[in-house]
Amino acid sequence: MSKATTDTQQKILATAEALIYQNGIHATGMDLLVKTSGVARKSIYRHFENKEQVAVAALNARDVRWLAWFQQECEKVDSPEARILAMFTVLKGWFQSEDYCGCAFINTAGEVGDPDDPIRHIAKHHKQKLLDYTLELTAQLDIEQPAALARQLLVLMEGAITVSRVMGDFNAADTARDVAQVLLEQARR
């Protein structure tokens, strides 16, 4: 694959990701992708068979990038407990960012009715990876049920994300962090 091919493909994916995140899958048609990316329709079809393939590739790229960013931000503090609480601080910062439109995976999964659709699989895989990271942190604590705590924390994060987007309440991350603190205290007993 030539550099020009890779650059064109990356431009298509970056544009598709931004459009899907901002507008959703259904509102992101090929015409809008062509117009926004500046890449000819024929070139897009050289790289991808259809719009679904573009969406799948764009969401897979977002999954990798978002989780790497999230983990890197959480890892800036020293202890597993501090990292767990930092997850909510990191989320709040994300909520307050200029281009915040909620969770791309919650949003796109909500657009797709078929549980076997590749978009739903990507969303599920993304959430599983977030749970795995949370479990990695809770397993480092001296507690009896790290998996149960990890699942509870995932529900808190997802709830904070949803409340921040639907209600415009960016302090939902603070509320979730407060509840996480209580869960951590209970788990240590």
Image (cartoon, rainbow, N blue to C red):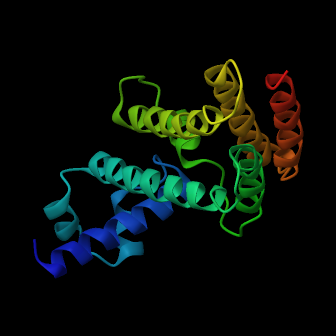
Q: Which residue corresponds to the image point at 71% horizontal and 59% vertical from the top-left?
A: 77
Given residues 85 and 127, the one toward you in this image is: 85
Against 147, is 64 above or below?
below
What is the residue that sits farthest to the left in this orientation? 1
Given residues 47 and 141, the one toward you in this image is: 141
Q: Is residue 32 visible?
A: no
Q: Which residue corresponds to the image point at 48% horizontal and 39% vertical from the top-left?
A: 129
Image location of residue 178, percent across then percent down: 89, 40
Q: Which residue corresponds to the image point at 78% horizontal and 55% vertical from the top-left?
A: 89
Q: Which picture quadrant has residue 15?
A: bottom left
What is the residue that sits farthest to the front in this orientation? 142
Q: Is residue 91 visible?
A: yes
Image location of residue 150, percent across then percent down: 65, 29
- Is 10 positioned to the left or the right of 48 in the image? right
Q: Which picture quadrant has residue 139?
A: top right
Q: Which residue corresponds to the image point at 35% horizontal and 64% vertical from the top-left?
A: 13
Total residue callouts: 0
- Is 145 positioned to the left or the right of 117 in the image? right
For the N terminus, give its image quadrant.
Answer: bottom left
Image location of residue 187, percent across then percent down: 79, 24
Q: Which picture quadrant has residue 84?
A: top right
For the C terminus, give its image quadrant.
Answer: top right
Given residues 158 and 149, the one toward you in this image is: 149
Given residues 108 and 62, the one toward you in this image is: 62
Image location of residue 173, percent across then percent down: 81, 47
